[in-house]
Image (cartoon, grey):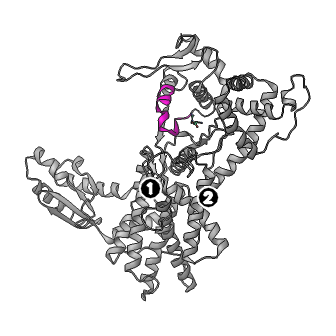
């Protein structure tokens, strides 16, 4: 279904052409003076020079061709040559009914869907999830849902950090604590135990302890590095411990992401890329892309047009070890073989931008991915506390995700209980749903690349540009619809009538922008524009609600008309929050 903006642009183009002007001039935009009109066209101004005519005259010519237009109820020419447009109420209603009849509310699926991989989440196994990983999960999940809604084939990959020094640290610490475990016995040839020698709780304590200890004790650090080396070279005992670490951590991660309503299709990680490294390195050498620099193997990626230095991509350290660059390149080899993607999107902290510039250039230059593959780095900013510094606990430590979520939920619980519409156990459940919305909306309503301040008080407020406000609006609509049904009304065979009042029309005009907004959001990878849109939509709905007797309306047909509009508004809001990755409760 064409967007309304496209439809009225076509209408204006025809009018320009019929009046003897170039149709290219007929660009229509949303009005920036909503008090005067709904849409506007400034094409007459642009045509003045070309046709050596006063813009006002051109505008008058065009307007005269629109006298019988079904789209507009008024076409006003204003000096020096603006064309101010108001939509005909019938036209608006017809558009909304088409939208309501469409499964995707008027959003057209892509005719040539792309195969897209989204690399997001990126937690490091065995280290507790912290708020830094929250943004990647929230933004990535939303982008995945938006691209899918547009009909693309999207695979979300968590890309675990599961192959680094933290593994060596854990192995070393475990050996110190439980030296008698068979994993450390070189002569052991039997089957290792199936059960892990630690719980998730222990694991989470082992890592920070080992990490701190290694900073103070060089010999311990050496040992951890050696354990990492052994693991990466297939040592049997280390590999068995690694598998335990993976199983225990991944089970815990799944629980955490589930709670965030974040779902990955692939649970691959850095370790999975390792087997692609030897052939890749050989290829880089054989084709002459790689060179040795001080013992390290590197690929140059500096380009002539760069105005600052872009260091070479590091493939192997002088001791032969692979690095972060290597793993990301090998992951692309894997992805190319398995999916041959049209696009790979990385949702990662923007401080890693240089790494991705190097990797992307190297991958293109060496043919690891074809020239036409789009490699997109979506760098996000830092989540800061109210003091403007990276978010910390009250004690100044790294805030664990679980605690952050709990804090928000407790706050939500208090607010919901203050409302006294639900009992305690329902309030707990509702607090989870609304708390998640508070966190996600608080994050997604900011442009991803910007830093933002995580403000519990503001994010959990029922008023203002917040998740809870949006949910409150949806819940309000649900409650009106439920009452309507209780009164014997039916929510079947609905048809939206032409708007009679100003607030009703304003709400309709906002609702019908949905497909246009979603197209832009997809093209610009900009979920924050969904937030801006639903905030406006919720505001228009609430104004309408306060100005209109809906259930008390005596004219049955008109009452049903209002209900039709409410049903559509609710669908639009729910679809939008679904794309953001959260949902609304029944009551709150
Ligand atoms: N594990 C990494 C980190 O915590 C993020 C991984 C991002 N994705 C990637 N393909 N490099 O910093």
Please, is residue 365 above or below residue 495 in the view? above
Residue 359 seen: yes
Residue 457, how many percent across, how many down? Answer: 48, 62
Horizontal placement of 102 versus 423: left or right?
Answer: left
Q: Nearer the viewer, residue 578 or 427?
A: 427
According to the image, label 1 marks what residue? Answer: 530
Please, is residue 83 above or below residue 338 in the view? below
Residue 163 seen: no
Q: Nearer the viewer, residue 300 or 363?
A: 300
**Magenta stretch encompasses residue 356:** yes
According to the image, label 2 marks what residue? Answer: 406
Horizontal placement of 303 versus 128: left or right?
Answer: left
Are there few (<14), some (14-19), or many (20+) residues within 10 Å of tag 2? some
What residue range appears in magenta?
341-359
Q: Quadrant of ligand 1?
A: top right
Horizontal placement of 181 versus 259: left or right?
Answer: right
Element class at badge 1: helix
Q: Which mark's residue is nearer the viewer, 1 or 2?
A: 2
Name the residue furthest bottom: 554
Q: Quadrant of residue 330?
A: top right
């Amino acid at each position: 279904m064409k967007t309304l903006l496209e439809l009225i642009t076509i209408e204006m183009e025809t009018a320009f052409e019929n009046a003897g002007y170039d149709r290219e001039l007929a660009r229509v935009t949303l009005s920036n003076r909503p008090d005067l009109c709904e849409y506007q066209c400034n094409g007459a101004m642009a045509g003045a020079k070309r046709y050596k005519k006063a813009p006002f005259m051109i505008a008058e010519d065009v307007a005269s061709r629109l006298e019988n237009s079904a789209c507009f109820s008024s076409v006003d020419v204003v000096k020096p040559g603006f064309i101010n447009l108001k939509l005909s109420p019938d036209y608006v209603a017809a558009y909304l009914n088409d939208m309501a009849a469409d499964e995707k509310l008027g959003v057209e699926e892509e005719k040539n869907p792309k195969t897209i991989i989204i690399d997001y989440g990126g937690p490091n196994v065995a280290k507790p999830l912290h708020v830094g990983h929250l943004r990647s999960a929230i933004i990535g999940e939303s982008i995945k849902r938006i691209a899918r809604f547009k009909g693309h084939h999207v695979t979300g990959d968590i890309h675990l950090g599961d192959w680094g020094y933290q593994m060596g640290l854990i192995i070393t610490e475990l050996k110190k604590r439980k030296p008698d475990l068979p994993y450390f016995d070189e002569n052991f040839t039997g089957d290792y135990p199936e059960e892990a020698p630690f719980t998730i709780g222990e694991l989470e304590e082992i890592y920070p302890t080992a990490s701190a200890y290694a900073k103070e004790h060089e010999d311990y650090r050496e040992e951890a590095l050696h354990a990492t080396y052994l693991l990466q070279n297939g040592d049997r005992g280390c590999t068995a411990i690694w598998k335990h670490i993976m199983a225990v951590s991944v089970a815990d991660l799944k629980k955490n992401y589930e709670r965030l309503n974040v779902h990955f299709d692939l649970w691959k990680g850095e370790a999975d890329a390792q087997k692609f490294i030897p052939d890749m390195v050989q290829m880089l050498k054989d084709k002459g892309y790689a060179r040795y620099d001080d013992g390290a193997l590197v690929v140059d990626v500096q380009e002539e047009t760069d105005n600052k230095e872009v260091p070479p991509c590091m493939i192997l350290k002088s001791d032969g070890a692979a690095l972060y660059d290597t793993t990301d390149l090998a992951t692309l080899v894997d992805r190319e073989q398995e999916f041959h993607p049209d696009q790979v999107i990385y949702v990662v902290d923007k401080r890693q931008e240089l790494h991705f510039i190097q990797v992307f250039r190297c991958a293109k230059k060496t043919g690891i991915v074809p020239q036409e593959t789009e490699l997109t780095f979506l760098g996000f900013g830092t989540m800061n506390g109210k003091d403007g510094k990276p978010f910390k606990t009250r004690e100044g430590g790294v805030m664990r995700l679980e605690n952050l979520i709990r804090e928000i939920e407790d706050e939500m619980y208090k607010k919901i209980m203050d409302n006294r519409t639900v009992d305690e156990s329902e309030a707990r459940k509702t607090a989870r749903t609304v708390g998640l919305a508070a966190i996600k909306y608080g994050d997604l309503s900011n442009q991803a690349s910007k830093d933002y301040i995580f403000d519990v008080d503001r994010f959990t407020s029922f008023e203002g540009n917040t998740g809870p406000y949006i949910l409150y609006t949806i819940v309000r609509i649900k409650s009106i619809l439920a009452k309507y049904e209780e009164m014997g009304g039916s929510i079947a065979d609905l048809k939206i009538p032409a708007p009679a009042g100003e607030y009703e029309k304003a709400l309709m005009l906002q609702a019908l922008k949905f497909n246009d907004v979603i197209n832009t959001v997809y093209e610009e990878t900009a979920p924050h524009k969904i937030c801006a849109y639903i905030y406006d939509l919720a505001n228009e709905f609430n104004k309408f609600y306060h100005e209109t007797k809906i259930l008390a309306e005596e004219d049955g047909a008109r009452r049903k008309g209002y209900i039709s509009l409410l049903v559509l508004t609710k669908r639009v809001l729910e679809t939008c929050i679904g794309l953001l990755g959260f949902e609304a409760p029944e009551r709150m």
